[in-house]
Image: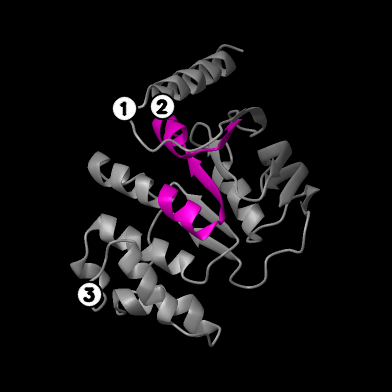
Amino acid sequence: MLRAKNISRVFPGGLVALQGIDLRIAEGDFLVLLGPSGCGKSTLLRLIAGLDKPQSGALIWEQKAPAPGGIGFVFQDPTLMPWATAAENAALPLRLRGQDTGPASSMLTRVGLAGFEHARPAKLSGGMRMRVSLARALAPRPRLLLMDEPFAALDEFTRHRLQSDVSDLARETKCTVVFVTHSIYEAAFLATRVAIMSARPGRIAATHDFATPITDRLDPAYAARVADLTHALGALHAG
């Protein structure tokens, strides 16, 4: 789908956030960017989204770049309009393009918010607000879904539920996902591919390919993936 070729990003003042990033995102990937805080994961995600531009290198779409609505973005904060209902928030990207808002209602039901369509964000829990944000991103059926540590502020139980839902939804909608996290356990559960990033300036230090995402945390394959990623991060730190 997309290739990042020798991407570098330098911020004003000379801070080098990314250097020499080479990465290929294949159609249907659930790609997790894994690395320590401050290594440039979110910066790379913003470049992919077209919200920022690199100083050098190029982002090359191997097919036609997604049309408007073809890229969904879920931020660390749900970023909902506080005066709008869950249904109105989820329908926003469709309404702005003059499209039928029916898919937003269907997606709210799919993410477990049936019966909460008329609730405003102040009446929703943190996990429910994130579900609205997810429904809003998926309602236009994007080809590419970008997620920037969306579950970092949630309790472990809610995180597990949402991780399972996102994994299921990615398969159902057949969208490609790029997901940012600094959690080895989250990466091991969700990813079909993991790109491990070094500390700043961010580089792709290693990639790990997995056949499928995990569906059961008691599966021995899950423990093996956690061990593999832990070893890889330990080797990177030691180096």
Tell me if residue 204 is in the magenta stretch. Answer: no
Q: Disc 3 marks which residue?
A: 119
Answer yes or no: do the residues labelled 2 and 3 have beta carbons within 8 Å?
no
Query: Cα distance, mark 2 to mark 3?
Result: 37 Å
Compare residues 227 and 35 and report the one nearer the observer.
227
Query: Cα distance, mark 1 to mark 2?
Result: 7 Å
* Amino acid beneath label 3: Ala
| Left or right of 116 in this view: 236 | right
Q: Disc 1 marks which residue?
A: 218
Instruction: Give the residues in magenta.
Output: 167-196
In terms of secondary structure, where does tag 1 sit?
loop
Answer yes or no: do the residues labelled 1 and 2 have beta carbons within 8 Å?
yes
Compare residues 120 and 110 and report the one nearer the observer.
110
Name the mark on residue 137: none
Give x and y (percent) for residue 51. Answer: 63, 61
In terms of secondary structure, where does tag 2 sit?
helix
**Lower sequence index among marks 1 and 3:** 3
Compare residues 148 and 135 and report the one nearer the observer.
135
Q: Sort mark 2 into few (<14), some (14-19) or many (20+) by Cα contacts within 10 Å.
A: some
Query: Cα distance, mark 1 to mark 3?
Result: 36 Å
Name the mark on residue 222: 2
